[in-house]
Amino acid sequence: MKKTARAHTNIALIKYWGKKDPKLRLPLMSSLSMTLDKFYTDTSIEAAEENSFYLNNEKQTSNASKRVFSYLEMLKKKYDITDNFTVSSINHVPTAAGLASSSSAFAALASAFCAYYNINVDKKELSRLARMGSGSASRSIYGGFAIWQKGDDNSSFAYSLDEKPKMDLHLLAIELNKNQKSISSTKGMELAQTSSFFETWIQKNDSELNEMIQAIKDEDFTKLGSLAELNASEMHAVNLSAQPPFTYFEPDTIKAIKLVENMRTQGIECYYTIDAGPNVKVLCQLRNVKDIKQRFESSFNNVTIIDASFGPGVSYLD
């Protein structure tokens, strides 16, 4: 017998970029995300004689499996379970390239574990459990728009703002670079806090979050896009001003940013957001999807563009 859960990845429009408590994965700021329909992870779990982890049908080394089984050890201790496991994940998200693959991965793993042992938890508790694997995974329990609130171990969980939005919002994932990022998100968050501008950014968190919530309620695409772009730029500005400074940007990242800005001046409304990686995500409305894709395809060689919209929360496949 095994249990399989599917969780979709999410992209933060108001970013999480800094831990108050690394062990408990408590954030320094609240965040707001959009769950995406095109990117997801299917994870199955079953008891076994020894631990093994398969990613995309390939058995992983013990070192590559360490984070998975460290997380499962925490769950086993919490629920007084002694089994070993075979964990199998099919990841429909480019791993470690700035598309938040860990959000869907740990949301699916937490959900599969609870389903396997018939652990009856509500979404709030499931979100809290997923957070212990990856902070952004707390938001992937939900579809549509979700908010992960800062707080202590008990109060830091995600909740749904709107699981089935009617807003005309598309996200074009522009895959410019398929390589793994050179600086992990964990290391990047540590370094970012050395920036003299980090505290200033933190102080803006509540007001930017509230503005984004209002933009969503008003279905105001212009406000949502401009605020998401600003928040992403602030995140990468603290990276550039860290000690030592660092960036996830590649030359093509800058080229993509300029292309988005140029399209806006030409009446094609769109905005960029960028997480911990070189790849750019473009926020737009349905009427502009075709034009934006054509502009990127004519500007970049062999670029992969995936048109995503709102995805659902966690589901169970068996």
Image (cartoon, rainbow, N blue to C red):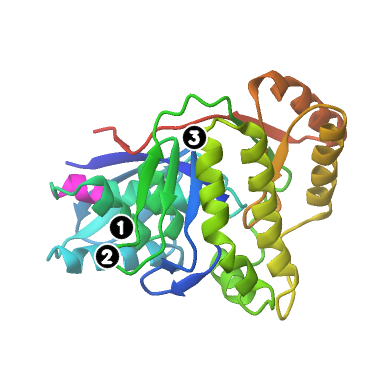
Q: Which mark is residue 128?
A: 1
Judged from the image, the secondary structure of the residue bearing numbered disc 3 is helix
| Magenta: main secondary structure | helix
Q: Quadrant of residue 190?
A: bottom right
**Which residue: 32% across, 58% down?**
52
The magenta region covers 112-117
Relative to 73, 168 lies left or right: right
Relative to 2, 206 lies left or right: right
Check disc 1 and give the amino acid type.
Arg
Judged from the image, the secondary structure of the residue bearing numbered disc 2 is loop
Check disc 3 and give the amino acid type.
Lys
Q: Earlier in the sequence, mark 2 or mark 1?
A: 1
Inter-mark Cα distance, 2 to 1: 8 Å
x and y, in percent, of residue 281 in the image: 66, 41
Q: Nearer the viewer, mark 1 or mark 3?
A: 3
Relative to 72, 281 lies left or right: right
**Which residue: 79% across, 27% down?**
268
Q: Quadrant of residue 182?
A: bottom right
Q: Which mark is residue 154?
A: 2
Is residue 51 positioned above or below 123 on the image?
below
| Mark 1 vs 3: CB contact within 8 A | no
Q: Which mark is residue 217?
A: 3
Mark 1 residue crowding within 10 angstroms, few (<14) / some (14–19) / many (20+): many
| Mark 2 vs 1: CB contact within 8 A | yes
Check disc 2 and give the amino acid type.
Asn
x and y, in percent, of residue 154 in the image: 27, 65
Residue nearest the viewer, comparing 147 with 210: 210
Q: Earlier in the sequence, mark 3 or mark 2?
A: 2
Mark 3 residue crowding within 10 angstroms, few (<14) / some (14–19) / many (20+): few
Residue 57 at least partly seen: no
Residue nearest the viewer, comparing 58 with 239: 239
> Could you tell me how many numbered marks the image carries?
3
